[in-house]
Image: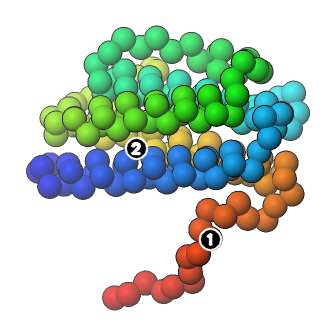
Amino acid sequence: MNEIVTQEFVEQIIFRWDESTRMVSLSFDQLSEEDIWKRPNLNSNSIGNLILHLCGNITQYAIASLGGTTDERKRDEEFTIDEGYTKKQLLEKLQSTLYKAKEVLGNCATNELLRKREVQGFVFSGIGIAIHVTEHYSYHTGQIAFWTKQLKDKKSLGFYDGMDLNIKNKK
């Protein structure tokens, strides 16, 4: 993998992370403090839990594993907490976590992106870790958007306001 491909890969991963962050932020703009900790039922997670879970996952995979720091994640706690963070604090925690993850990924040499390591019992290359974080973040961003739409009875959250999404691909 040459440096141009490595740079393009990293830029595309970071773009996707930034897109998910933008969508989560737009969802948060429409939620009250109380909405953050509501659960659809006892077996579901609140948006607050999803944010804490994302921060734990991103820290474990991107920051600790790719960055070579100690994995101190307490995964079960991410789902049991039901208060203690405001909307602003949760969003700042997510943004801070992503900032660190982007720094780590941006500083990964090609050999580190290709090197395999064990994370959470799985074996991934650095590329696999970046892809995992991206798809995991996107998955939970969709859950946050869906739950926001349910709570606010909205068809759209404005993710693509001002854009024509019916434009056809150019050859």
Q: x, y percentage for residue 4?
A: 14, 55
Q: Amino acid at mark 1?
A: Asp
Q: Amino acid at mark 2?
A: Ile
Task: Please indicate, yes or no, whether residue 109 appears anywhere in the rendered image.
Answer: yes
Q: Residues within 10 Å of mark 2 (few under 14, many from 20)?
A: some
Left or right, 31 with respect to 113, comes to right
Q: x, y percentage for residue 65?
A: 34, 23
Q: Residue furthest left?
A: 2
Identify the residue under disc 2: 131
* Residue displayed at 45% across by 25% down: 59
Q: x, y percentage for residue 149?
A: 79, 54
Left or right, 61 with respect to 8, comes to right
Q: Residues within 10 Å of mark 1 (few under 14, many from 20)?
A: few
The image quarter in which residue 50 lies: top right
Question: Label 1's element?
Answer: loop
Q: Contact, CB < 8 Å: mark 1 with mark 2?
A: no
Q: Residue furthest front?
A: 88
Q: Nearer the viewer, mark 1 or mark 2?
A: 1
* Residue displayed at 70% across by 60% down: 157
* Residue displayed at 73% across by 64% down: 156
Q: Earlier in the sequence, mark 1 or mark 2?
A: 2
The image quarter in which residue 126 lies: top left
Task: Please indicate, yes or no, whether residue 123 appears anywhere in the rendered image.
Answer: no
Q: Between residues 125 and 30, which one lies in front from this camera angle? A: 30
Which labelled disc corresponds to residue 161? 1
Which labelled disc corresponds to residue 124? none
Q: Is residue 14 shown above or below 71? A: below
Question: Label 2's element?
Answer: helix
C-alpha distance separating marks 1 and 2: 27 Å
* Residue displayed at 16% across by 36% down: 109
Q: x, y percentage for residue 112?
A: 20, 32
Please state, as top left, top right, bottom left or bottom right, where the C terminus lies in the image: bottom left
